[in-house]
Each structure stands twice: as structure tokens, then as C-alpha cells.
Amino acid sequence: MTQPATSATKGPDDAPAPTPAGAVGFAIPHRDRLSFNLDVDICVIGAGLAGLTVALEAARMGASVAVLEARQVGWNASGHQIGTVMPGFGVPIGDLIARIGFHDTRDLWSLAKLGMDYVRDLATEETMPGINLTQGALEVSNVDIGDRLIGRLQMLGEDFSTEVEGWQIDHVRDVLKTDRYFHAIHYPTAFQLDGRKYLRGLEALARQAGVRIFEDTPAVSIDPSGIRKRIVTPEARLRASDIVLAGNVHLGAPLQRLSDTLLPVWRYAALTQPLGARLAEAISFAGSVTDTDGIDHYRIVDGDRLLWSSPETTWAAQPKRLGGAIRRRIRTVFPQLGAVEIDQIWSGVVGQTVHGMPQVGQLRRGLWVASGFGRQGLNTTAMAGQLIAQAIMHGDERWRLFSPFELVWAGGRTGRIAGQAISTAVRAGASAAGLLARYRERAAAREAIHEARLEAAKQNARQARPPRPPKPALADQPAAAEPHETTPAQ
Ligand SMILES: Cc1cc2nc3c(=O)[nH]c(=O)nc-3n(C[C@H](O)[C@H](O)[C@H](O)COP(=O)(O)OP(=O)(O)OC[C@H]3O[C@@H](n4cnc5c(N)ncnc54)[C@H](O)[C@@H]3O)c2cc1C
């Protein structure tokens, strides 16, 4: 995986900036590997966003916490995300209602909002200098969905207390100069931040709260039976009252069956070279843009560069081999940008569950899972971290709202092949639907022009017609014929 290294997207290992007073120190003093036996209250496996948030919250509540990380903090998806924080989950709200009913969906939605608020509260310039938080995200439609949009807006706004605005086509095309998009939902309270800085800030806060993080320390097996559970690493053993599995798709040996419930999806993102003034002419929306088909996700960073995340594969590919695909996507949506050079490109693996919802909860007494956050992991890992820490420390049972989303086998190799086929089909379907919608729009425009021309021609014809001779004056008219009796029809 390549690491981007501009000011907007510094890699996890970049030299730390000086720390202003009140800010968490980004300097990581040393990278410990666990080489001695340890007893703690909670052992978290995996130092991504999920593991770090559980650890931070539990430590703040007074627990002694050790985090085991097989490689380095944020090595996978968490260190490669592009920092958009959205409300809800990566599953359409209608699907959730169909599965678990309106009330539980509403409760889950509020939990996801807690996650969003948590990130916003933590990610201040004072605490995480350079986090660069900006407001607003647009979900644009590739097809003309005016009617459906109104229904969704009403539901999100009225029933799910989510701030949303419906944008008409003209408004969307005013800020995104492309005929690819039609209507949009604007989320004014969604936001974006520097994803790497958030990860680093979270790590620093966790260390400050007393969390001990051990890198290059894979958990190779666990024994979750008994009150004190055992965790084995290559050089040491731990005992803990609670274990939190936050290893995402790479968890492996400690609970292979759990890893098998996730479909690994490699997601790629790229940062372009500076594009100059032409970028501002094409895009004047300052926040993130995603499309309803989940194909493209982008925003402007550093003034005139595009941060663009698009293709996905269910196998690992060299990120640089996907550069052409990202360039093509940019060109397809914004042809006026011309040739766009890619500066950096990288990837991370997200864990996709069969039902699309994250895995949050207790597998057996003292064995917890926080995994499967898919493409929308910023608010949801923050939510899961709080829920699990509060469950362990205070017996909070809200995690049970996730119980209807069972651990379902993701289908192994066959699942990956099917996953790729589905993703390709969705993209092809979206592209065909977009093509049809644009065709209809052009046909409607042609029709409108045709009608306008017809109307103009009629108008001209009316004006060109010789004026009618004036009607004769009453006196000149012949006398009206005498009225005669009519026989009513039989
Ligand atoms: C390109 C890209 C862009 C994205 N953009 C966004 C975005 O804008 N907004 C958003 O909300 N989401 C985004 N996401 C999704 C988000 O990054 C993920 O959902 C989230 O980071 C998942 O976090 P995690 O902690 O569950 O997993 P991970 O980041 O995978 O962390 C798990 C960690 O566990 C460690 N581990 C695994 N097994 C073991 C073991 N046995 N022992 C010790 N350690 C172990 C791994 O090494 C890893 O570091 C994006 C993802 C990608 C790839």
C-alpha cells in the first residue's frame, strides 16, 4: 500500500508537526512489541479506528487496556480512508426498515449519529491540529429520481431527525458542472476531515489515557473460556477479563470463523496533481460528493487537487495498476478537466458483511466483536467503540440492537467471485441507468426545443398572415333572417 504524503493526506509515519499547547502530541515515542506477559482488564485485538476507539473509551472509564496490533497502527483501511463522516450506515434506510422495523431502525440511526457527533467532538483543531474539518456532503443521483427523493427526504428529516436538503438538478449542476448528475441530497451536518490525522489523534489520545499499544504483535490464538481469558502472541501471553476482536478482515487465527463472515473488498483512492483554476470551474462544492450507486466518492483538497476514491476489487491488486481506472472515472464525470495526472494512489481492505451492517456485540461472555464496518467506518467505528466500552464498563445493553444482524458466512472464494460480479453488475447497471436517464433528459430537451420552435413558427405565421378585412359596420350588414321554428329531434 502506498502512502499519500501531501499536507491534506499525510501518511501515518510522516514526521510529526510541533504540537501546540492543548493539542494531543502526534509524536509517537516508540513502537513497542509485546515481549513480556501482561495482565489487563481489556485486551483489544487490532489498532484500527474500531480498536482504538474502544480502547480510548474504556481507558477513560478507568480500565487497564492493552491493544495488540499485528503490523502498525492504522496499517489497513483506517490509515487509508478519505475522511468523510456521514450519518447512518452504508445500507439504504428502507432496507433496514424492511428487515428490523421502523422503531429499531430509528434507534440504530440515533446510535450512528452518536458516532458522528463523537468524531466531531474529538476532531477539533485544538486537539488535532491540521485536522481541517469542513462541513457538508452531497449524495448525488446518477438518474432522475425527483419523486423518490422527496419521500426519502421526508423520512430522513421528519422520522430520523437528520438534517437534509433536497437539491434540484439546476442547483446540483451549478456546483458540479457535469450532466452526469440529477438531483441530490445535501447533508449540511456531514463533514470531512484529514483521515490520517484523525487516526493519529485517536492513537495519541488513547496513549494519553493510559492505553498500551503493542505493534508487530499479532494475536495468534485466544482462549475465551473462563473469567480470565487468555491471548497468545509470538513472544508473550496476556490475561484479560474481556477481549475485543477489532481485527476486521485480517483477524485470522484467533477466530477464523469470524473473519469468514466478512467479504474483503479492496478499495482504491488517489490524489491528483494540482489541477489549477480549471478544477474550481468544474467543482465549486467544498464538501464530499458521493453518488447513490456508491461508485465515486471525491472532494477537493489542498485548494486544487482531487481526492478520489472509486474502483473496488475482491482481490488484492497493485494500487498503481488502478490509476488508469480512476483517471477514466474523473474524465467520464468531468471531461472538461482534460488529462489529469495522478500523484499518489493507495488502497485498503474493507470488511463487508452479507447484510451490510457492522458486527457489534458480545459473542460469548467477555468476548466482544467490533468489525465489518465496510465503506462507512468513521461514524460507525466511533459508535461501536463507545457502545462496547460502555457495555463492558457499565453493562450498557444498547449493542443488542445489532443482534438481528447475525454472523453470516460470506461465501469464501465463491463469495469473492460473486461479490466482484455483483459489483461489476451494479456499476454496469448504474452506468446503463445513467445513460438512459441522460438520454431521456436530452430527448426531453430536444422535445422542448422542438415545441418552442413550433410555437415560434406559429407565432411568425400569425404575424405574417395579411390582416383580415375589417368587419362591416352593423348598419351595412344584411338584415337578420326571420327566426323560424325548429322541430325538436325525435
Ligand atoms: C480507500 C478507502 C477510503 C475510505 N473512505 C472512507 C470515508 O471517507 N469515510 C468512512 O466512513 N469510511 C471510509 N472507509 C472505510 C473505513 O476506512 C473502514 O470502515 C474502517 O477504517 C475500518 O476500521 P477497522 O478498525 O474495523 O479495520 P482496520 O482498519 O482494518 O483495522 C484492523 C486492524 O486489526 C489488525 N489485526 C487484524 N488481525 C489481527 C490479529 N490477529 N492480531 C493483531 N492485530 C490484528 C490489522 O493489522 C489492522 O490494523 C474507507 C476505506 C478505504 C479503504
Image (tube, rainbow, N blue to C red):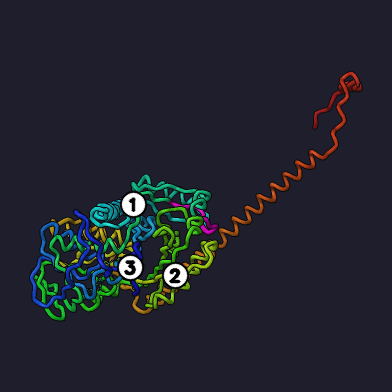
Relative side of 317 to 21, left or right? right
Where 158 sits versus 91, above or below?
A: above
Q: Helix, strand or loop at disc 1?
A: helix
Left or right: 332 as drawn, with respect to 228: right
Disc 3 marks a residue whose amino acid type is His
Quick check: which quadrant has ligand 1?
bottom left
Q: Residues within 10 Å of mark 3 (few under 14, many from 20)?
A: many
Looking at the image, is mark 1 or mark 2 earlier in the sequence? Answer: 1
Magenta region, residue range: 177-185
Q: Quadrant of the C terminus?
A: top right
Residue drawn at x 19%, y 66% is: 368
Task: Report if the beta carbon of the residue with label 3 is closer than 8 angstroms to ligand 1.
Answer: yes
Look at mark 2 in the image and give the residue it sits on.
342
Mark found first going from the N terminus, 1 or 3:
3
**What type is the residue that disc 2 sits on?**
Ile
In the image, residue 465 lies in the stretch drawn in magenta:
no
- Viewer-closest of 331 and 363: 331
Name the spot of residue 450 as percent of width and height, x first: 69, 51
Amino acid type, callout 1 = Phe
Taking the magenta stretch, the answer to whether it contains residue 184 is yes
- Measure how far apart labels 3 and 2 are at the Cα level: 16 Å
Image-based side of 472 in relation to 279, left or right: right
